[in-house]
Amino acid sequence: MARNKFDVDEELESPFSFVHLKRLFTYLKPYRKKILLTVLIMLIASGANLIGPYLIKKAIDDSIPNKDVGNLVVLSCIYLGALVITGICMKFRIRMMSEIGQSVILNIRKDLFTHLQKMSFSFYDSRPHGKILVRVVNYVNSLSDLLSNGLINLITDLFSLFVIVGFMLAIDVKLTLMAMLGFPVLAAVILLIKNAQRKAWQTLSNKQSNMNAYIHESINGIKVTQAFTREEENKRIFRDVSESYRSSWMKAVRIQFLLWPSIENISILTTSIIYVFGISQIGEGVTVGALVAFVGYISMFWAPIANIGNFYNAIINATAYLERIFEMIDEKPTVEDQPNAVELPLIKGKVEFKDVVFEYEEGERILKNVSFSVNPGETIALVGATGSGKTTIVSLLSRFYDVSTGKIEIDGVDISTVTIPSLRKQMGVMLQDPFIFSGTIMDNIRYGRLDATDEEVIAAAKAVQAHQFISGLADGYQTEVNERGTRLSTGQRQLISFARALLADPKILILDEATSSIDTETELALQKGLETLLAGRTSFIIAHRLSTIQNANRILVIDKGKIIEEGSHNELLSRKSYYWNLHQSQHQSLEVG
Ligand SMILES: Nc1ncnc2c1ncn2[C@@H]1O[C@H](COP(=O)(O)OP(=O)(O)OP(=O)(O)O)[C@@H](O)[C@H]1O
């Protein structure tokens, strides 16, 4: 999918083909025994159901004229038995079909979610997250009808149709051929609406996706919305996207509902013709009982056809969703293990950037031939203006993106040749946005290493000076926090995610603006401990506050994607260049403050 926003319809990169449908049915494979059993039960049910008109014919033509009460009772008992069997089978069918349909939905959703876990940063950068959500939740739900009813109904309806035509032929061949007259009309209707219907459902799925994306974005940005009193404007935008969804829904169902009335009308028309023709034939080979039974079968005959029409509708609707679902499952992560990737052995922590060039968007160079080398255990600070490329440099080290050209080596091994988990497991990354998951604070820190004991979690929290504030909370480490940590201050979130990164005990530690929102007192305490925390690890520290990084072994000054200065704090100051200017301006603003 190309870069997209909430009010832009997504373009389909691989349009629907029947391969998608075949692929959907592979999800049914594990349930084939259950499906077969259900089909069998359904065949019994439709057989029992279909016998009714034939029994009526027998009663009208034989038992009643012959006043054969005994036979009439037998016929009634058979009819009653058939109704009971149909009822029991139907109940079984509903249970089995729901079970099979929901299991398939669960599996498709599982595949989608598993796939999403592997997708690279660039996938999430390029589209509204609401559009991802709508595929996993709503689109998959929309397959429910097709999966739980469609296929089994199709088989049993075809069977019913076959049996009904058999009964009809047995009663009267001429009347049967007349009943078939409606078929060409129905085929013409289906052909006429097919393309319009498919298009309408595709548009509907797009509009649903747009609306979802906007709701998602609005909820995420609600604080900014309220702070800037943008509620009215947001309501207007929402009205537009939801109106667009409503009108495309109306259009889709208007087309879809052309089919049902057409089938009904054709059915009524052919029944009338049969009545007129049949009555004129009574006494000339057609009995009253045969005509009544025949009309009974005619009404039954159009029911499976209507159901098959419905199945066809369900397929057309589902395809609009299926193509989106499979498009996402098929989208390859941009960062993947190479086919011959090897495990990165336990590292010492030497890092080398060799002539690294990087572009997020083709043709827009963000990093321009960046080269530097870091020895194991060294602390490297990256400073530079906003947007100069600091976060990009450390993101490449974790392979959140792959370099465009050049290479990055750890202990002499090109990181593009190793497996991603073996690389990332040896790194502790604290991202600029310290994400907090819903759960306890203990769980959130333990995210860094799932097998860490409570004591290890607490030790990590103590090391980053987070213990004090956590102990001050009513439930301490067991305090429940919301998704994104809205109950915590930004500084507290930073401390938790700092502890999380440290708990992984990584050889390479990346701290992107780790302490930017922490008060000076806590930061000073943290700084004191930092030396011990960083000992033996290669560390990359990104900070705008120069006081945070002046003890680093080396400072790289980044400007517009290039390293323009490099050295220790004192060396860079003595050069009286970019870093010195930066230092002076921070110093002056502090003094003014
Ligand atoms: N996901 C992305 N897609 C496209 N461009 C991006 C993406 N992330 C960053 N950029 C661009 O890359 C450039 C470098 O961004 P980067 O985040 O590396 O800067 P930074 O030096 O870390 O800035 P800051 O100090 O504000 O965090 C910026 O011009 C930014 O617009």
Image (spheres, rainbow, N blue to C red):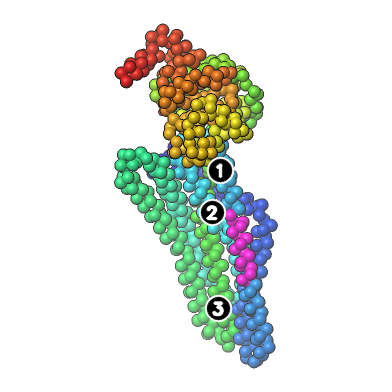
- Please tell me whether residue 69 is drawn above or below residue 515 in the rendered image: below
Residue 250 shows in the view: yes
Percent across and percent down for residue 108 are 58, 48
Between 577 and 73, the residue placed more toward the observer is 577
| Residue highlighted by disc 3 | 295
Examine the structure image and report whether residue 91 is included in the region drawn in magenta: yes
- The CA span between labels 2 and 1 is 17 Å
Which element carries disc 2, helix, strand or loop? Answer: loop
Q: Which residue is mark 1?
A: 113
* Amino acid type, mark 3: Val
Q: Which residue is mark 2?
A: 143
Above or below: residue 232 compared with residue 121: below
Query: How far apart in space, not on screen, are marks 3 and 1 (Cα)?
Result: 52 Å
Magenta-colored span? 86-102
* Secondary structure category for the residue under label 1: helix
Q: Residues within 10 Å of mark 2 (few under 14, many from 20)?
A: many
The quarter of the picture where residue 544 lies is: top left
Q: Do tag 3 and tag 1 residues touch (Cβ < 8 Å)?
A: no
Could you say where residue 51 lies in the image, as x and y percent from the top left? Answer: 63, 76
Query: In the image, what residue occupies the spot 47% across and 31% down?
Result: 469
- The kind of residue tagged 2 is Leu
Which SS type dominates the magenta stretch?
helix
Q: Residue at x 44, y 30 (%)?
A: 491
Q: Secondary structure at mark 3?
A: helix
At 36% from the left and 52% from the top, the residue drawn is: 243
| 300 to 338, vertically: above or below | below
Q: How many marks?
A: 3
